[in-house]
Amino acid sequence: MADGSGSTAGAHGVRLGRAVPRGAGAWVPPVTPRLRLTLLGVGAMNSPRYPPAGLLVRYRRRQVMLDGGPGAEPAGPLAAWLVCDERSELRRELRALGAARGLHPAVAAISIADLVIEPRPVTHTSHLTWGYLLRLPTASAVWAPEIWAFPAWAAGADLMFADAAGWNRPIRFARGAGGHMAALQVAEQAREHRVTRLVFAHIGRPSLRAIDAGYRPPFGEWGQPGRTYQLPPQTHDAARHARVIGAAPSSSHPGRARIGPLCAPAVASRLWPGRYVRCLARVHFCAHHGR
């Protein structure tokens, strides 16, 4: 396991990724107090449309890459480059991309402050392969882009990135060596396992044909390269109160709110439209819905 500096330690006897040293003038990611997960690719192997499935994890000035490949490459330094399958078809390309950043892509665990990213076994092919569980004290996410059976450890996840290589039928490997679940199977199993939000992030040709025909899964959504997801998820009420509590009318835009220091009395009071609350030490006005 790693410490907050972004170093990595092996899990389940796997090898370690190495952190990139920072030189003078090195690019430093901005602070991201919330966990940000950006899809850099959502394609299955040899996809005619998308770069290979890859997820960029950003948290507290640290970046970690999960899978990816040519066309799905992160910008800036990485604390680690983690993969689900060290024997995948893209292993040579991934090793070259990692070497350019001073990293060796591997199955490993890492922690960044209170974020823990750890590999969990999945059923996919004849050799051992992995998914990743990303855990915060208040939220969790799952990266499982290639699965033949739904992983029980993904139950209750707030967000899951999953396989959609097949659409309505699973893809079986030769000689019973595993394969890929169909997207419709994944959707059904994710709902049964109480996954809050499902994103299909490994889209194969059968699912591409379904997309082009206008089909939608009964549960879940199609992933898109460049789309970012945040944890913990921000609810509508939380977003509304973030705008209202501790806000003061803006002098340049009277109808808008300017976010200021947290107004303690406003937290304790239930605000109704048109009612304003005066803070104690410093005067700030809190307007419901920014009015």
Image (cartoon, helix red, strand yellow):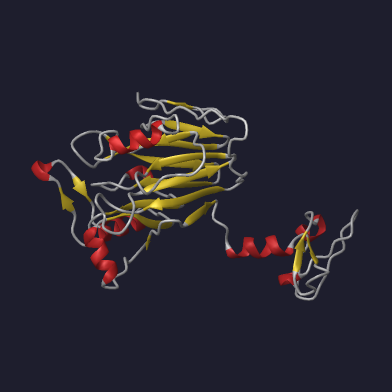
Q: Residue 115 placed where, x, y %?
A: 53, 38
State the residue lying farthest toward the front: 25
Quadrant housing residue 99: top left
Q: Is residue 170 left or right of residue 78?
A: left
Which quadrant would the C terminus be assigned to in this image?
bottom right
> Quick check: 235 above or below 58?
below
Along the viewing direction, whichever of 11 and 255 lies nearer the viewer: 255
Q: Residue 87 placed where, x, y %?
A: 25, 34
> Quick check: 253 above or below 220?
below
Q: In percent of the image, x 25 and y 54: which residue is there? A: 165
Along the viewing direction, whichever of 150 and 21 lies nearer the viewer: 21
> Quick check: 236 above or below 274?
above
The answer to whether any part of residue 85 appears in the image is: no
Q: In percent of the image, x 26 and y 72: which residue is there? A: 213
Q: In this view, does 146 lie to the left or right of 19?
A: left
Q: Residue 226 placed where, x, y %?
A: 45, 56
Q: In percent of the image, x 63 and y 62: which residue is there? A: 239
